[in-house]
Image: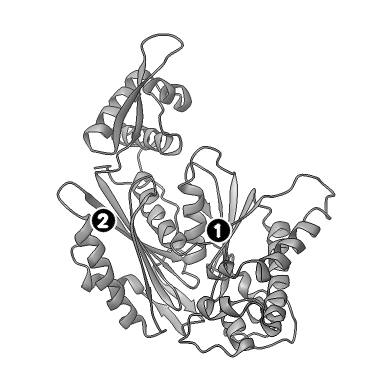
Amino acid sequence: MSTSYQQQHKAGDLHFLKRLNRSAILELVRRTPGLTRADIATQAQLTKATVGAGVQSLLHQGWLREGELQKSSGGRPGRALHLNEERHVLFGAEVGVHGLRLVACALSGRVLESHHEHIVPTTPEATAELLAELLQGLMRAHMSDERRCLGLGVALPGPIAPGKPVLRLAPNLGWRDIRFLDLLRPHLSRLEGTWLMDNEAKAAAFGELYFRTGNIPESLVYVSAGTGIGSGMVEGSHLPLVARGIHGLAGEIGHTVLQPGGLYCHCGNRGCAETLVSGWSIRAALGIAEEEDLIETLLPRLHEPDVQVTLRRAGEALGILLLNLHHTQNPSEIVLGGSLTQLGAPLLDPALDYFKANQSRLLGTTQRVPLRVIQDSTFVAARGAAAQVLASIIHGPNELS
């Protein structure tokens, strides 16, 4: 689902302008905790009276809290402002091929509770029913009169139709044209607020940028290397925009062809990147059954020659994908996550060595794009889906409450 939350309004609409100012104030405090009212007035180019009224409203509604007195170079000291972590809760979930991952988050993205449920691939209906049961446990623990639920974001393993909550295809699950939120709703009547869904790599990319504070990159690509392999690109710090494409296929790097005439992929094409580097292709090469946990099975076997050869080849293919993303998307930062990163050096060293050796050849520049590896990204996509819920509320058309 698109994360472009455009507000419809009439020119000169005072209510809209007040809403816009409160959104700007909340975003500034979210990105830079500890700002004072004077800091906000300067950075947002708003009058002190406008900031004062907006802050007072956000304090009253429980979005912000006041902290310590800050020293001032002139005039009276001001109170530091922070997000109020006690008033709201966001829920995020990821439906993976072999697991369900759930989080309850505070406004800053801090994970209040998480849960990972290993599953065997099944039908959308059975998956939705189990996910709803697990979410109800989080709801009981974190929803109360004092803590209001803002909504639920769900990350799914395939492209989402632009502008529609429809999972077009999950090739590694065999699902097609699934309205997953419609399957969830009958089981979660108490879960109010904003509901949305997105591709798991795009949700992860959004969360990695949106929940960042301090030094925020202009753009970021997140690469998800798990059962399949995909990516998501986001740009902009105020409200990150997600690259989607006309069919929602932007970032589907696992189905770019690296080996023409190669092995058949689950999508039906031959020679896709996933036939060389993915959890399912590694399983196939090493004869690991679907019901076995891939990482737990492989970690004790990393010394075996056939495992080392398989992971080295997969790592080299991953390095090619990273270089291709660098040349085609050219983000400010690349983040590599997904369950396969837990395999460590046998997979990652060939990938990172290839990327490092080749990323500067085209321009001959010494300025390198940073590549960050997340060793445990179990809940990154679920947390990113929660971030999308928060952004939709802060920048959406409805009143903050």
- Residues under labels 2 and 1: Cα distance? 31 Å
Would residue 226 be found to the left or right of residue 179 on screen?
right
Disc 2 versus disc 1: nearer the observer: 1
**Image coords of residue 24 (percent x, y):** 40, 35
Q: Residue at x 42, y 84 (%)?
A: 121
Q: Residue at x 62, y 73 (%)?
A: 254
Q: Observer-nearest residue: 171 or 178?
A: 171
Which color scheme does this rendered protein use?
one colour
Would residue 96 be found to the left or right of residue 92 on screen?
right
Mark 2 or mark 1, which has the lower sequence index? 2
Q: Amino acid at mark 2?
A: Gly
Query: Residue 374 bears which disc, if any?
Result: 1
One can see residue 257 in this view: no
**Image coords of residue 227 (percent x, y):** 53, 76
Q: In the displayed structure, would residue 24 be above or below residue 106?
A: above
Q: Which residue is identified by label 2?
A: 193
From the image, which quarter does the N terminus lie in? bottom left
Circle 1 packing at 10 Å, graded few (<14), some (14-19), many (20+), is some
Q: Quadrant of residue 41?
A: top left
Please say if the residues under marks 2 and 1 sit with CB atoms less than 8 Å apart: no
Q: In the displayed structure, would residue 113 be above or below residue 224?
A: above
Would residue 55 be found to the left or right of residue 241 on screen?
left
Q: Observer-nearest residue: 318 or 29?
A: 318
Q: Amino acid at mark 1?
A: Ile
From the image, which quarter does the C terminus lie in? top left
